[in-house]
Image (spheres, rainbow, N blue to C red):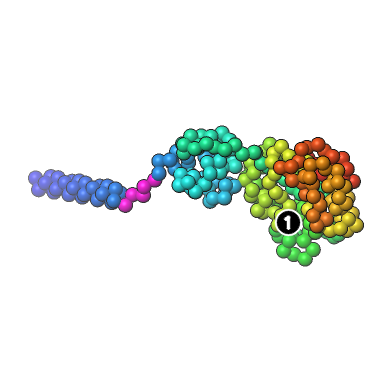
Amino acid sequence: MEFIFGIVLAAVIVGVTGLLIGLLLGFAGEKFKVEVDEKELLVRDVLPGNNCGGCGYAGCDALAKAIAAGEAPVNGCPVGGSPVSEQIGEIMGVSADASAKKVAFVKCAGTCEQAKDKDVYYGIQDCNAAMSVPGTGSKSCSYGCLGYGSCVKACPFDAIHIVEGIAKVDKEKCVACGKCVVTCPKQLIELTAYDSEYLVRCNSNDKGKAVKDNCAAGCIGCGMCQRACEFDAVKVVNNLAHIDQDKCQKCGACAAKCPTKVIRDML
């Protein structure tokens, strides 16, 4: 009888203890709970979840919090594009201004065939590693793509690859997250409008003869493209042509006049 009583007593004590702990945990949870904006949760459900950082925030959670707090625009996700922006706009009760799709563009046409080599590089096949050693790679042009694929490793969408010694972007896969832009040690990659037709595939500031000595596909700063443009969209600054995509009417006059054919589309 005493044995049974002991078991019952132990069960009661365990039960009461568990109940007290449950009550204390419930009280503590209610007392110290962190209030989460319902809109933040709804926005987070809409975001794609890539956590690529292309929006400028640490990830989708951080962007959702910023949008809910009014600190980030509803079209702040480059991966989701217009469909996601419209859904977030409905949640936040604001209009999602349509923004033109952007893609990464590599400002170099110095393929293995076009660019000259000054020596042979045997180091780590990584652009940032090559930049840290004397010589910085094998190519003569100090402005051009090294071709060791740091941008390829950085891209979470398999949108950039090394083709014929230079980085090439697949504009259909690119979501303009900007990781390749940040990674490139030569600042050769920039974001441009998806529908851009004429772009300068060079980043050299050398004068014409020096450019030709290093690469057959470089901008020599001759100014023929600038003179050919009727819309004031092309300017040669510091020996390098630049095209203002907002002014460009896609007439192709600059590309037709370019003697080195360095003005072309992304493909």
Q: Which residue is drawn at 71% across and 42% down?
A: 246
The residue range painted magenta reads 32-36
Q: What element carries label 1?
A: loop
User: Which part of the image, by quadrant, shows the C terminus?
Assistant: top right
Please name whichever residue, 69 or 228, is drawn nearer the observer in this view of the structure.
228
Give the camera-side residue of 207 and 50. 207
Quadrant holding the N terminus: top left
The residue lying at 11 percent from left, 46 percent from top is: 5
Question: Is 131 displayed left or right of 263 in the figure?
Answer: left
Q: How many marks?
A: 1
In the image, taking residue 7 as reference, residue 205 lies left or right, namely right
Disc 1 marks which amino acid? Answer: Lys
Nearer to the camera, 237 or 255: 237
Vertical placement of residue 192 versus 131, above or below = above
Query: Which residue is at 29% across, 48% downward?
Result: 30
The residue indicated by pointer 1 is 186
